[in-house]
Image: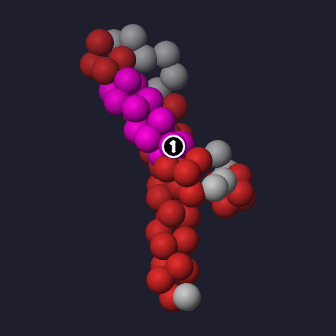
Amino acid sequence: MKYTEVKKLSDDNLEKNILDARKEQMNLRFQKAAGTLENPNRSRELRKDVARMKTEQTARATAQAKN
């Protein structure tokens, strides 16, 4: 997910996407431990997506605190 896409999300959708990505990360960790992981790069992509979403979430909170 690109940062421009993240900026377009509402606060509720942003929170939901973060939770969904975290759940998917957990499932990928289980797959890795079991040896059934098909796409090892997906965990890296998810980690970066979560970071992008949390960065936007923090930026919104900071902007709201300033107002």
The colour scheme of the drawn protein is secondary structure
Q: Is residue 32 visible?
A: no
Q: Does the magenta stretch include residue 17?
A: yes
User: Height in image: 18 above or below 20?
Assistant: below
Q: Nearer the viewer, residue 64 or 37?
A: 64
Image-quadrant location for residue 28: top left
Q: Residue 33 at x, y = what percent?
A: 27, 19
- The kind of secondary structure element at disc 1 is helix
Crowdedness of circle 1 by 10 Å Cα count: few (<14), some, many (20+)? few
- Residue in view at x 55 percent, y 71 percent: 60
User: Height in image: 60 above or below 4?
Assistant: below
Q: Nearer the viewer, residue 25 or 37?
A: 25
Q: Quadrant of the N terminus?
A: top right
- Judge left or right: residue 39 versus residue 2: left
- Judge left or right: residue 10 versus residue 48: right
Q: Kindly identify which residue carries mark 1.
A: 16
Q: Residue 29 at x, y = what percent?
A: 33, 27
- Residue in view at x 55 percent, y 51 percent: 12
Residues drawn in magenta:
16-29
Give, as a three-letter code, the residue at label 1. Lys
User: Height in image: 62 above or below 4?
Assistant: below
Q: In which quarter of the image is the C terminus?
A: bottom right
- Residue in view at x 53 percent, y 79 percent: 64
Q: How many labels does the image show?
A: 1
- Residue in view at x 35 percent, y 30 percent: 26
Q: Is residue 15 visible?
A: yes
Q: Is residue 38 magenta?
A: no
| Magenta span dominant secondary structure | helix
- Judge left or right: residue 30 versus residue 60: left
Outermost bottom residue: 66
